[in-house]
Amino acid sequence: MHVHILYFASIREQLGSGQRLDVSALGQAAPLTVGQLCDYLRALSPEHAQALAEDVQVRAALNQTICDMDQALAVGSNDVCEVAFFPPVTGG
Amino acid sequence: MSGAPTSLPTSQVHVSVQTDDFDLSQEVTQLRQGQLDVGAVASFVGTVRQWWPSSEAEPQAQFLLEHYPGMTERVLAQAAQDALVRFEALGIRLIHRVGSLSAGDQIVLVTVAATHRRAAFDCCDYLMDWLKTQAPFWKKEVAHGEGRWVDARDSDTAALQRWTSPVSDATKKG
């Protein structure tokens, strides 16, 4: 399964607009939830750890719908899903 | 990204995420077009407050608004449609600007037509509370060469929670 990861606002400034990840290739380490994916990304580099730190209050959306961190990623190995990570919204 | 041609009948809900400015008077005209059962129109316009001390000149100041292309437009349209049904409004136009703005610029418009005033006021008020806490937009203020992402406010979240109780009868009659 491929995950198309998008970053917005302060997280985008630090990590770029996003990245693509072949989750199936990670085997046992493959994240099963959005929160586990966030943990996996945090471990990639000190920059990732800082941009996605707990105190950023990272929010997430799966396939363009706001979701909790315990939201399951898609099941089938051929699926492509879009996961976005961003700080709390400040529109209006 | 811009509004529908004026020659076509307007739908009940119009949502736009755009870099261009908007004109309140034109939007209200579009909203009311051909709807003779409208008895009330309530509008809210949000503007960019100056974010550096007013005594200081800051010609390089920038106000940046980022969104999630695709998702933002979709969730705004859904929220406006839901609000239309919930408050029994007759029409809604919602515009949110993105990109680079300046102090004093218009940033957001919500205008609602309804049969009676209470529904128009409440629907407009609710949509702004929803937008502040649920719509994927992020603001950044730049002044004196330093940028700062605007923090989300707990008071905005509390404001949305006012609407979790069922709509009162007063809302429907007005």
Image: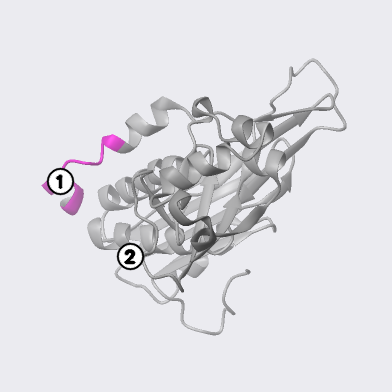
Q: Which residue is disc 2 drawn over?
A: B38
Q: Secondary structure at mark 1?
A: loop
**Marks 1 & 2 on one chain:** yes
Residue numbers of the magenta segment = B161-172
Location of residue A70 in the rendering, given as x and y in whole percent from the top left corner: 34, 45
Membership of B21 in magenta stretch:
no
- Furthest residue toward front: A28
Residue toward you, B66 or A59: A59
Instruction: Say which quarter of the image contains residue B115.
Output: bottom left
Crowd band around label 1 with a 10 angstrom C-alpha radius: few (<14), some (14–19), many (20+):
few
Residue toward you, B41 or B87: B87
Q: Secondary structure at mark 2?
A: loop
Q: How many marks?
A: 2
- Furthest residue toward bottom: B8
Location of residue B70 in the rendering, given as x and y in whole percent from the top left corner: 54, 64
Q: In the rendered view, tell whether residue B92 sits above or below residue A34.
A: below
Q: Which residue is disc 1 drawn over?
A: B166
Crowd band around label 2 with a 10 angstrom C-alpha radius: few (<14), some (14–19), many (20+):
many
Instruction: Say which quarter of the image contains residue B116.
Output: bottom left
Location of residue B41 in the rendering, given as x and y in whole percent from the top left corner: 39, 55
What label does residue B45 carry, if any?
A: none
Horizontally, is B64 left or right of A22 in the view?
right
